[in-house]
Image (spheres, coloured by chain):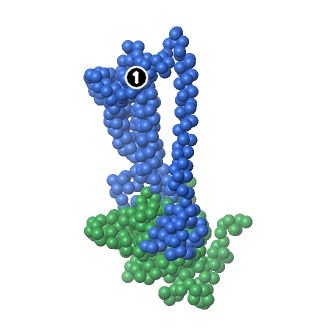
Amino acid sequence: MTAQSAHTLIVDTPAASPAVPAAVRSKEAQVLAFAPPRAPLGERVWGTVQSWLAVIVPPIIVLCALLLVWELASSGPKSSLPAPSRIWADAKDLIVDPFFVNGPQDIGLGLRVLKSLERVVMGFGLAAVGGILLGALVGQSVWAMRGLDPIFQVLRTVPPLAWLPISLAAFRDANPSAIFVIFITAIWPIIINTSVGIRNIPQDYRNVAAVLRLNHLEFFWRIMIPSAAPYIFTGLRIGIGLSWLAIVAAEMLTGGVGIGFFIWDAWNSSRLSDIVVALVYIGVVGFVLDRLVAGIGHLATRGTQAT
Amino acid sequence: MMPFLKVDHVSKSFARGNATTEVLRDIDLTIERGSYVSIIGHSGCGKSTLLNLVAGLTSITTGAILLENQEVREPGPDRAVVFQNHSLLPWLTVYANVKLAVDKVFGATKPRSERHDWTMHNLELVQMVHAKDKLPAEISGGMKQRVGIARALAMEPKVLLLDEPFGALDALTRAHLQDSVMQIHARLGNTVIMITHDVDEAVLLSDRIVMMTNGPSATIGEVLDVPLPRPRKRLELSSDPTYLRARETVLKFLYERHRAPALQAA
Ligand SMILES: Nc1ncnc2c1ncn2[C@@H]1O[C@H](COP(=O)(O)OP(=O)(O)OP(=O)(O)O)[C@@H](O)[C@H]1O
Ligand SMILES: [Mg+2]
């Protein structure tokens, strides 16, 4: 137990460990570990701040430069697009308060985004479950692959919005139709990546499962999912990106209070400044969604790639 | 009396398209309960294939394998395998890797706390309790191999199948693990079939050494009994005449009568 904790301490202070040969990791090692040559607190904090600044400052500079160019380019009286200063004047309420409610159709962009996200979560969630299950089937069974893969390959090239009329006819309601469009858009990369991941499960793991006589369900949860997790998360990440692309387009056509319909509405009443603000919202949310799935994937697949 | 494990005129061919290659031909072998048998032969002669046949992981082309008079048709925990490259599941901790096997084999017969104790007991056997919460990526090659052995032992197999269990290890770790396996074998008395490349390892550990000819169509060239008393100490054996004679027999087989195909070509 003592040796174990001393070991941990040494690992904590990398600067101290090379001086300690493995053979003498005893009492002495422990004493050494308690006197690590660490930089003073102030210096370490400054180091962290510096590395953060290096990440944050360049994009801010570029952003300011872009805004400036944009401002100059569209400041003439005949310009067809609003300059940043015009946008600020026109759409200040949208920018500063994402969550205001002035009436059933007059709500902040944050609330609209949430409404759209709700649809994306449902459609994407269904696509994730369905995609992983179908992907597992196609990856595991040669016959399922032969039968289904050609169909998937054809269907996945159908543009998301081409599904909309069919789904409107089938569901007779805008909201489920939008969700269906998300589902059908996001599911293909999830199916395809999952099946590739399943086909790439090392024979060793299959042998272990065979010796242990894992049944299908145990094999699915204990071997397939963890082993294919990196592939599955690649599929999920592509899928969430596509969902977000499709929701805006779908909402333009189905109406409601989502962010997509807001853009359509703003266009019809010539509120160009509002559209620009909405675009920024959509971009930021899409970015956050992508990072979220990537982050979860990173956490969930920690041990899996290592051998 | 029926033998414990009988490999009865087994042949194995792999078919790819129209071409079939015969890897093993007419392998005939009987193994008694509690004995330690090594299979030695040049790389690619079909040792792993033979072990996988006994494990039930690959199907037999002709012949049959009988374990306690039951025909082997599919893999199962009564023939636990320690694979050539440890094959721990990288997303499970050391403890969870062993526990998975324990839960699967004893899920119906032992209560939860007993399964925990049994898992810990097997980790103790290979001295891996201290790293039980580590992931396989965080431990050394020798430690992984030990966990693989613990996982196999934890299934209480009728036959323990070891596929070059110490192949990828340095000499010191290898010697250390060989000693542990000998101790475990002495304590539990399990039947072991071990594949190896290493003549000294084969003679030190085995009751019998099965020497295989080169492939394709490899078969058993010779079987050598090693009548050394147990427990065996590697230092004392190094000058023991029986040990030296056994070692010489195997070396002669491998390097005079059945040289590696690559060496013959050169
Ligand atoms: N699934 C397979 N399909 C076709 N041929 C195979 C297959 N598995 C093994 N072989 C062939 O069988 C022969 C024996 O392979 P095997 O893995 O049993 O050798 P080995 O004796 O274990 O070698 P090593 O000591 O290097 O591990 C090789 O020539 C190999 O190419
Ligand atoms: Mg092999």
- In this view, which residue lies farthest toward the top? A78
Tell me the residue that label 1 is attached to. Answer: A92
Crowd tier of the residue under label 1, counting other residues whose Cα lies within 10 Å: few below 14, some 14–19, many 20 or above:
some
Kind of residue at disc 1 = Lys
Question: Splitting the image into four quadrants, where does ligand 1 fall?
Answer: bottom right
Which of the chains is blue? A
The picture places residue A93, in percent across and down from the top left corner, at: 37, 23
Q: From the viewer's perspective, tell me whether residue B243 is left or right of residue B104.
A: right
The picture places residue A214, in percent across and down from the top left corner, at: 36, 59
Which quadrant of the structure image shows residue A265?
A: top left
Residue A38 appears in the rendering: yes
- In this view, which residue lies farthest toward the right? B266
Q: Residue at x 56, y 18 (%)?
A: A72
Q: Is label 1 in a helix, a strand or a loop?
A: helix
Q: Give the quadrant of the C terminus of chain B.
A: bottom right
Q: Give the quadrant of the N terminus of chain B.
A: bottom left
Q: Residue at x 48, y 57 (%)?
A: A203
Q: From the viewer's perspective, tell me whether residue B18 is left or right of residue A261.
A: right
For the residue pair B34 and B181, the one nearer the viewer reads as: B181
**Chain B shade:** green
Say above or below: A115 vs B215: above
For the residue pair B169 and A122, the one nearer the viewer reads as: A122
Q: From the viewer's perspective, tell me whether residue B15 is left or right of residue A145.
A: right
For the residue pair A100 and B216, the one nearer the viewer reads as: A100
The picture places residue B85, in percent across and down from the top left corner, at: 52, 64
Say above or below: A107 vs B179: above
Which quadrant of the structure image shows residue A218?
A: bottom left
The picture places residue B67, in percent across and down from the top left corner, at: 39, 72
Letter of the chain that mark 1 sits on in the rendering: A
For the residue pair A155 and A232, the one nearer the viewer reads as: A232
Say above or below: A307 vs B212: above
